[in-house]
Amino acid sequence: MELSKRVLAVKPSVTLAIAAKAKEMKAQGIDVISLSAGEPDFDTPSFIKDASVEALQKGFTKYTPVPGTIELRQAICRKLKRDQGLDFTPDQIVVGTGAKHAIFNVLFALLNPGDEVIIPSPFWLSYPEMVTVLGGTNVFIQTDEKTSFKITAPMLEKVLNPRSKVLILNSPSNPTGAVYTKEELLALCKVLHKHPHVMVLSDEIYEKLIFDGLKHVSIASLDPEIAKRTIVVNGHSKAYAMTGWRLGYAAMPDKALAKAVESIQSHSTSNPVSFTQPGGVVALDKGDAEAVKMLTVFQKRRDFFISLLKTVPSFKPFKPSGAFYLFVDIQATGLSAFDVAKKLLEEVHVAVIPCEPFGSVHHIRMSFATSEKDIEAAVQRIAAWAKKQTVPA
Ligand SMILES: Cc1ncc(COP(=O)(O)O)c(C=O)c1O
């Protein structure tokens, strides 16, 4: 059997390999603590579930319109107006089976072979794989702690050229938790003005998870000209603890693009699952109070986790302003991120994510979407492990 060249270019997921190994160890009765979760550990709020259970029982079990029900797309338009001040109509919205699916379909609709997609690094590992499978070219902008893992206007200016097609922005970021301010985004807008052929894909999936009273800003809300070429992506997974529901969407500036994305979806997965959609409406209309409660817990855990990690001098966390991950510099261990992750799992049974596939060999990602008890126990194990390591000269 010969696999397609496109698929052969895609790297298998290291993240999944670690998760599979952790699962296997758990099945053998080993007490593994997982800090690898990419999803809230809370249950979906019950009033959201109730809406979908009711729909299911009333027989809402058939195909819906491909881009999602009109009710859900109207709720998304209300949300984008309320939270970001953005004006969209339902025919500019396509709901997919998760934001991941929505991003894939948008890139599918936009990319021609050789088109460059600009990705600030570190990045969510799926972006470059999607670009590769779709025949585009990844152009990374490497960031570090000096700019709090954010790109600046001069960094962006340097990579833009006539082949540049899409800039992907992800604020708050997975894996760093970096959050762009209004001023930083305005500076990027200034550069983008000089390159009118460049589209922006703004992945705002962690929007509701921003700490210390900071506010989420969508680049689409800052500048009408940039808004005309920005696709806003968001979803229910992280904000309302609905990862398994698979609801995510793209809001497109151009109806022709929305039609193209709908058309791709119509030939692959069709509509998002019918009975998740009424729950999705309720989540957007009434879920924010629950999202705030979860945020409060996440912020407390973040601070607790950072304070505990002071006992492990070779692990240096970047304090995230959003999402639920600690992005931890492990250079002082003298090991690669993958080796640290492998050793922690095998030697002290703590699962973390090595960030090589996220664009950094020097970092691991530790999720705090888990209990304080587990965080504390995990750090104790890591501290004991780190004490035994001898750092190469
Ligand atoms: C940055 C980012 N974007 C998009 C997604 C996709 O989320 P979903 O497909 O569950 O909506 C994730 C999930 O981990 C993510 O971290």
Image (cartoon, rainbow, N blue to C red):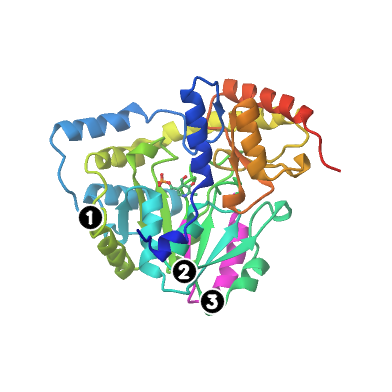
Q: Is residue 127 left or right of residue 54?
A: right
Magenta residue span: 179-202
- The label nearer to you, 1 versus 2, is 2
Q: Which mark is residue 136?
A: 2
The residue pinned by badge 3 equals 195
Give, as a three-letter code, the residue at label 2.
Gly
Q: Quadrant of residue 345?
A: top right
SS at mark 2 in the image: loop
Image location of residue 12, percent across then percent down:
48, 50
SS at mark 3 in the image: loop
Of pointers 1 and 3, the one earlier in the residue sequence: 1
- The label nearer to you, 1 versus 3, is 1
Give, as a three-letter code, the residue at label 1.
Val
Query: How much space separates mark 1 and mark 2, taking CA atoms?
Result: 26 Å
Quadrant of image for the C terminus: top right
Of pointers 1 and 2, the one earlier in the residue sequence: 1
